[in-house]
Amino acid sequence: MASTADLTRRQLLTAGAAGLAIAPLSALGFDLHEAKKAQQRFRIAGAKEVHSVCPYCAVGCSLIAYTKEDGGKTQLLQIEGDPDSPVNEGTLCPKGATSMQLAVSARRVEKPLYRAPGTAQWQEKDWDFVLDKLAANIKATRDNTFVAQDASGNVVNRTEGMAFAGGAAFSSEEGYFATKLMRSLGTVYIEQQARV
């Protein structure tokens, strides 16, 4: 180390600032030598890095998911934007930034819930009940609101009593399938959540 006579002005100011920063901590009883020895355990230390794509829209932002094996079960620790991606360069929109909640949110509904007309309570139902109820409601709505011809006599074969909004988490294939299904039912009002 250089002697005091060999110190430059910049080195002297740096050493002085460091001393001023440390002095109050030592006076308050902090043992700085122990603090330097302690290693901080990061939440993602030793985690496996898995590259993925955000499920919310068609932009295709890249994600990095950090996972760790815990007793034979994979635990999701963190999801963040991939800085090496030419699409999003590590940034995520508000929806993408919350993509971890798709897997770990305590508020996530994991079973079908049904609220009967006139009641305030939700009931857990199985998928057979829900799909049968959905199919019956779609058929009843289509039968009651189907328009075969418009006012001028043109054949239109459309259903104006229902609408469909695709989810932003749809893949391209799911969106294509949903659109074809809705068009085959005669649905006119079709929209996509990512565009709204």
Image: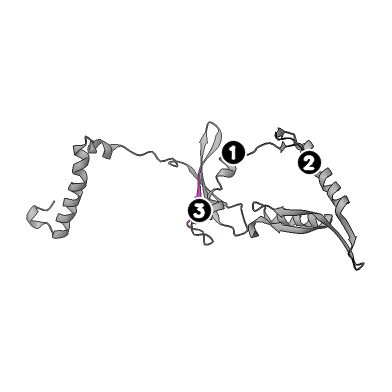
Residue 194 position, x and y percent, is 64, 57
Circle 2 — which element?
helix
Circle 1 — which element?
loop
Magenta part of the chain: 78-90
- Which quarter of the rendering shows the C terminus? bottom right
Q: Residue furthest bottom?
A: 152
**Which residue matches tag 1?**
107
Q: Relative to residue 134, is residue 173 depicted above or below?
A: below
**Which residue matches tag 3?**
81
Residue 73 position, x and y percent, is 56, 34
Q: Relative to residue 105, is residue 177 depicted above or below?
A: below
The three-letter code of the residue at mark 3 reads: Gly
Direction from residue 186 to residue 84 in the image, left or right: left
- The prevailing secondary structure element of the residues shown in magenta is loop
The three-letter code of the residue at mark 1 reads: Arg
Circle 3 — which element?
strand
Task: Please check the rendered image and state whether residue 172 is part of the magenta-colored stretch, yes or no.
Answer: no
**Which residue matches tag 2?**
131
Q: Residue at 88% of width from left, 58% of height from top? A: 147
Q: Residue furthest right?
A: 153
Direction from residue 141 to residue 169 in the image, left or right: left
N-terminal-most mark, 2 or 3: 3
Which mark is drawn over residue 184? none
Residue 12 location, quadrant: bottom left
Q: Say which of marks 1 and 3 sits in front.
A: 1
Direction from residue 104 to residue 189 in the image, left or right: right
- From the viewer's side, name the closer residue of 41 and 157: 157
Q: Say which of marks 2 and 3 sits in front.
A: 2
Q: Residue at 55% of width from left, 45% of height from top? A: 100
Residue 192 position, x and y percent, is 68, 57
